[in-house]
Image (cartoon, helix red, strand yellow):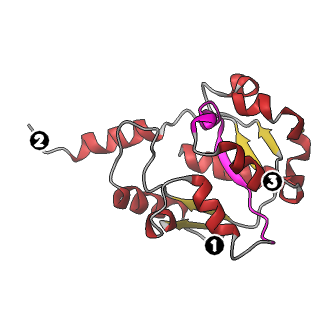
Amino acid sequence: AGHMHVIETAFRALRLDRVWVFVAAGNPLKKTQTAFSGRLDAARKPFSGRRIAVSGLEAELGLRYTVDLLNRLKRPAPHARFIWIMGADNLRDFHHWRRWREIAKLVPIAVIARPDASPKVGLSRFARQFAASRLQEDAAHTLKHARPPAWVYISAPLDRTSSTELRARLEARSLPPV
């Protein structure tokens, strides 16, 4: 639900044609991981549709980092206008991502409000370093035409659903009775 909230907010504010959901093969910043195939199947159910495509491309190509995925996507389609969409909760730790500055220079970035992170978005290392590249929220729809580095923060009604919390609930339901 939290991811769908981010996608729906991005569709509206950015006036997007299509969203690709790339299920990460693994997250080097997380201590625990759920199985990739389970996450991919779980993402396909609510997200797949005419304007949303769910992909396991990162795993298929043996990639582990966002910067490598973006470089692979851009290589055969240099004129395509990609936007990286992330929740504000990810922006807090974005400077820990591999080659995060390069990501910012590869594609414009849309940061969608998320609970417990939004008021601090301007304090993140990324936000400070790329402050001059920030668009005003009322110009969010122009992000797809912006040359990177460019980013926008999009406020929205907050959905407190956590993917970690949802996975824990699902796993608890699938445990055999004691």
The span from disc 1 to disc 2 (Cα, nearest Å) is 39 Å
Q: Which residue is mark 1?
A: 50
The question of residue 170 being in magenta is answered with: no
Estimate the x, y position of residue 134 in percent, counting from the top left.
86, 38
Estimate the x, y position of residue 20 in percent, counting from the top left.
62, 63
Q: Along the polypeptide, which appears first: circle 3 or circle 1?
A: 3
The span from disc 2 to disc 3 (Cα, nearest Å) is 46 Å
Binning the other alpha carbons within 10 Å of mark 1 as few (below 14), some (14 to 19) or many (20 upward) gives few
| Residue at the image point whose x is 65% and y is 68% from the top | 73
Q: Which residue is mark 2?
A: 177
The span from disc 3 to disc 1 (Cα, nearest Å) is 17 Å
Q: SS for tag 3?
A: helix
Q: Which residue is mark 3?
A: 14
Q: SS for tag 2?
A: loop
Stretch of the chain drawn in magenta: 79-96
Disc 3 + disc 1, Cβ < 8 Å: no
**Residue situated in front as seen by the camera: 3 or 117:** 117
Looking at the rendered structure, the kind of residue marked 1 is Arg
